[in-house]
């Protein structure tokens, strides 16, 4: 359980984090979104006890980060931004150092090391100095380090940055495989990733919390949510589509020829359109139900609300 | 306690994973040989002791200790690994001590590897071994004082060169504050009390007796206090500036 109250951080006079308050319960997998410089990393640095808050309080498992930082850090696995590590060590030495720090011993230690090396597929680079690894492998080492002690709370700052698509998939799998009782906070710039692995989205911009709900709610904010788009193979009269029950508006992209029909709030129009198209034998190539465009919603939330935020 | 040891182990290994420790030890041995034989005239003196050898130690340490310590925190900051270190369940004090001990052990190792000198005076005459052991301990203590200052300077910056230069300058002040040049400069206007105070901060005056094999409580205590004070300063600097 993480409880944050009125958290702010100033760098000199610059307010990087502005009065954040939120609670995160076990089982929450939180996607932490925001434009560059929004204050995501700064917030994570405060949650992990690296930076002291300028104002406000952080409680993790009923303990204050001010007074109990070391105990809290035992329960946290943290991948800092850029996945820093000790470059002169080999992957193997580095993981053993972390295992020492995490007080893993005996059979359990072996099992954890084996498990983690297997999960993030570090087997081939174990004896290479970390400095010589590619960016993606460095990230994987950082990830291995964070999950080595199987922490209750996992805080990952851009864990999939620089990973190839297979590895991205692996990391998502890994997060999904974690027990349901854990707290995971990941920051990312890949919106689809949030929709895929998170059950909660927090968007911050200019240090302020702009959105805090499930990915579905976020999707529903998009006017494209439940919209239907279609493409014609040749020109035909489709004006009747706009008159259908529940259709609010029709938009035609002149460049691509893509036709998009927006529903009235709460209405489902796919079937009606489908039927209409079949009855009239319209020359429709593709007919798609849109699920909502996250990038557009993200843009709206992080820019438009500046005025009333 | 355990954490300090874990950090020490890692740091010590990292000195040897990079050429730092080897280069340091090689240069230390070379320079101490050159100083002792060519400038200190160890053999020509016709005495079975290592006083010329030890007398050069403050000057050797003045450049070599900042060189070995400049990396310790500056690099940590530059690479960002400080964020990892400080978010592991290791306290900043444990990290400072662990790093300090590792570097101090490397210094001790370099010192220990000068044993052929000891063997050669033993071969040529009959030195007082007690005196030599005491002088070695004294030298190691002084190295610790240099190291604590250099650690603190390394904590100030993410740039190793800056850390090195700052450390040399501060160490230099501590070395020369007891030399006649500085004391003469104070002489005309400062009272005896000030003069004594300035001189009492000097590594040279505290090491003088140690080089001769006398481990007086006040000298030993002085170097310990220097270490404690500067390590504590490092700790404060790191906690205040770790994210900059
Ligand atoms: N050490 C620092 N000193 C001064 N300002 C800083 C420092 N660290 C971060 N900032 C500023 O604080 C703001 C928030 O930075 P932060 O790193 O938290 O952003 P972020 O949301 O993680 O961005 P990104 O998506 O680029 O990683 C930025 O404007 C940044 O310039
Ligand atoms: Mg960031």
Image (tube, coloured by chain):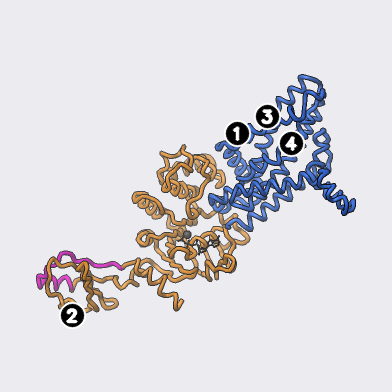
The stretch of residues the image draws in magenta is A273-292
Mark 1 Cβ and ligand 1 under 8 Å apart:
no
Q: How far separated are the C-alphas under marks 2 and 3?
A: 93 Å
Lower sequence index among marks 3 and 4: 4
For image coordinates 18% across by 78% down, the residue present is: A244
Which label was assigned to residue A243?
2
Q: Colour of chain B?
A: blue
For image coordinates 63% across by 51% down, the residue present is: B155
Q: How far separated are the C-alphas under marks 3 and 4?
A: 14 Å
Whether tag 4 and tag 1 are in contact, CB under 8 A, the answer is no
Q: Which residue is mark 4?
A: B57
The picture places residue B207, in percent across and down from the top left corner, at: 80, 39
For image coordinates 83% across by 35% down, the residue present is: B214
Q: Does the magenta segment cover residue A286?
A: yes
For image coordinates 34% across by 51% down, the residue present is: A165
Q: Does the magenta segment cover residue B37?
A: no
- Between circles 4 and 1, the one closer to the viewer is 4
The picture places residue B57, in percent across and down from the top left corner, at: 74, 36
Q: Which residue is mark 3?
A: B113
Whether tag 2 and tag 3 are in contact, CB under 8 A, the answer is no
The picture places residue B139, in percent across and down from the top left corner, at: 75, 36
């Amino acid at each position: 359980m993480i409880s944050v109250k009125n958290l702010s951080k100033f760098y000199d006079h610059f307010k990087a984090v502005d009065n954040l308050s939120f609670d995160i319960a076990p089982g929450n997998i939180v996607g932490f979104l925001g434009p560059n410089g929004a204050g995501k990393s700064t917030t994570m640095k405060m949650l992990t006890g690296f930076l002291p808050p300028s104002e406000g309080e952080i409680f993790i498992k009923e303990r204050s980060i001010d007074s109990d930082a070391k105990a809290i850090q035992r329960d946290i696995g943290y991948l800092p931004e850029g996945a820093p590590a000790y470059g002169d060590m080999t992957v193997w030495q580095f993981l053993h150092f972390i295992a020492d720090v995490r007080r893993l011993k005996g059979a359990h230690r072996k099992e954890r090391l084996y498990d983690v090396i297997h999960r993030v597929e570090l087997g081939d680079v174990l004896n290479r100095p970390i400095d010589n690894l590619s960016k993606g492998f460095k990230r994987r080492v950082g990830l291995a380090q964070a999950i080595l002690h199987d922490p209750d709370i996992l805080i990952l700052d851009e864990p999939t940055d620089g990973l190839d698509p297979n590895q991205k998939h692996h990391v998502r799998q890994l997060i999904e495989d974690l027990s349901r009782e854990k707290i995971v906070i990941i920051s990312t710039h890949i919106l689809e990733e949030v929709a895929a692995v998170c059950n909660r989205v927090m968007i911050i911009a200019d240090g302020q919390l702009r959105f805090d709900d499930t990915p579905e709610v976020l999707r529903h904010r998009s006017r494209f949510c439940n919209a239907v788009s279609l493409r014609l193979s040749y020109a035909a009269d489709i004006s009747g589509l706009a008159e259908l029950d529940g259709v609010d508006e029709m938009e035609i992209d002149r460049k691509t020829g893509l036709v998009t029909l927006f529903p009235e709030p709460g209405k489902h129009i796919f079937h009606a359109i489908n039927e209409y198209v079949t009855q009239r034998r319209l020359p429709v190539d593709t007919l798609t139900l849109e699920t909502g465009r996250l990038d557009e919603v993200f843009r709206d939330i992080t820019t438009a609300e500046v005025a009333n935020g | 306690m355990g954490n300090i040891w874990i950090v020490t182990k890692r740091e010590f290994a990292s000195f040897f994973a990079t050429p730092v420790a080897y280069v340091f030890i090689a240069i230390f041995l070379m320079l101490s040989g050159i100083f002792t034989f060519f400038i200190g005239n160890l053999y020509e003196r016709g005495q079975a002791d290592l006083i010329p050898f030890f007398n050069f130690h403050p000057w050797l340490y003045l450049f070599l200790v900042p060189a070995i310590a400049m990396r310790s925190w500056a690099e940590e900051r530059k690479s960002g690994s400080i964020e990892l270190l400080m978010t592991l369940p290791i306290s900043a004090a444990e990290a400072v001590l662990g790093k300090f001990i590792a570097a101090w052990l490397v210094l001790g190792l370099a010192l220990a590897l000068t044993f052929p000198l000891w063997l050669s005076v033993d071969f040529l005459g009959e030195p007082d071994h007690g005196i030599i052991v005491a002088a070695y301990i004294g030298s190691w203590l002084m190295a610790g004082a240099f190291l604590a200052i250099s650690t603190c300077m390394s904590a100030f910056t993410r740039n190793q060169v800056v850390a090195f230069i700052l450390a040399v300058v501060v160490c230099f002040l501590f070395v020369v504050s007891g030399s006649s040049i500085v004391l003469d400069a104070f002489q005309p206007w400062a009272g005896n009390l000030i003069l004594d105070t300035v001189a009492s901060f000097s590594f040279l005056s505290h090491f003088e007796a140690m080089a001769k094999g006398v481990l007086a409580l006040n000298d030993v205590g002085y170097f310990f206090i220097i270490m404690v004070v500067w390590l504590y300063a490092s700790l404060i600097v790191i906690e205040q500036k770790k994210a900059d």
